[in-house]
Amino acid sequence: MESQKLVIFEANQEEYGIPVEYVVSIERLGTVTALPEMEAYLKGLMKVRGQLIPVLDVKHILFSGTVEVNDKTRLIVVQTSDLSAGLLVEDAKEILDVKKEVIKDLNVLALQSSPYISGMVNLNSRLIAIIEPDKLIGTLEKIHHIKDAVEASTL
C-alpha cells in the first residue's frame, strides 16, 4: 500500500503538510536580517548551514497574519525547483506517514483559489491540507527579485 510522508506544521491553528521530499531541514529561528522595502511575506534573509535563504512568513502568505515568534516557532527549509527557502511556521509538529487512500483531491473551485494546495488528508479528527512548496513559492509576488538577490549574494 502506497503512502506519502508529510511534515506537519501549524499556521493560524490549522494543520498543513509539506511532502517530505521538499524538506531539507527543520530549524530553530536564528538571526534574520531584514531587507529594505521587502515584500510583507518576507521576514528577511538567514544563514542556514552556510547557505543564505529567504525567510517566508507562512501565516502571512496563507492568512495575511504574522507568525508570533516563540519557543515553538520553526523554520522549515525547503528546496523547490527555483530556490531554497525557509518557511516560518508557528510549530512543526511531526512527520506523518499517510496512506494514499486518505488523501482527497480538491475540486476545481478550490484549486483556482488555492493552487498550491494539492489535496486534503482526512484522518479521524484531523483535516490536513497538503501544500506544494513549488506552487506556493511560485505564486508569490516579486519572488523572482528575491531569488536574484539571494543568488547575487552567494556569488
Image (cartoon, rainbow, N blue to C red):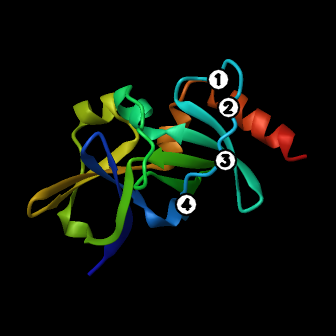
Element carrying mark 1: loop
Q: Which residue is mark 4?
A: 27
The kind of residue on which mark 1 rests is: Met
Give the CA distance from mark 2 to mark 4: 18 Å
Relative horizontal placement of residue 139, taking residue 55 as reference (left or right): left
**Residue visible at 57% across and 49% down in the picture:** 86
Q: Nearer the viewer, mark 1 or mark 2?
A: 2
> Which class describes the residues within 10 Å of circle 2: few (<14), some (14-19), or many (20+)?
some
Q: Report the front residue among 80 and 37.
A: 37
The kind of residue on which mark 2 rests is: Ala
Q: Nearer the viewer, mark 1 or mark 3?
A: 1
> Which class describes the residues within 10 Å of circle 1: few (<14), some (14-19), or many (20+)?
few
Relative horizontal placement of residue 102, taking residue 5 as reference (left or right): left
Q: Is residue 94 above or below residue 29?
A: below
- Residue 110 figure quarter: top left
The kind of residue on which mark 3 rests is: Leu
Q: Which residue is mark 2?
A: 34
**Residue visible at 80% across and 42% down in the picture:** 151
Element carrying mark 3: loop
Looking at marks 1 and 3 on the same chain, the residue that comes earlier in the sequence is marked by 1
Looking at marks 2 and 3 on the same chain, the residue that comes earlier in the sequence is marked by 2
Q: Which residue is mark 3?
A: 83
Q: Which mark is residue 38?
A: 1
The residue furthest bottom is: 1
Give the CA distance from mark 1 to mark 2: 8 Å
- Residue 1 figure quarter: bottom left
Q: Tell me whether circle 1 and circle 2 mark residues in contact (CB < 8 Å).
A: yes
> Which class describes the residues within 10 Å of circle 3: few (<14), some (14-19), or many (20+)?
some
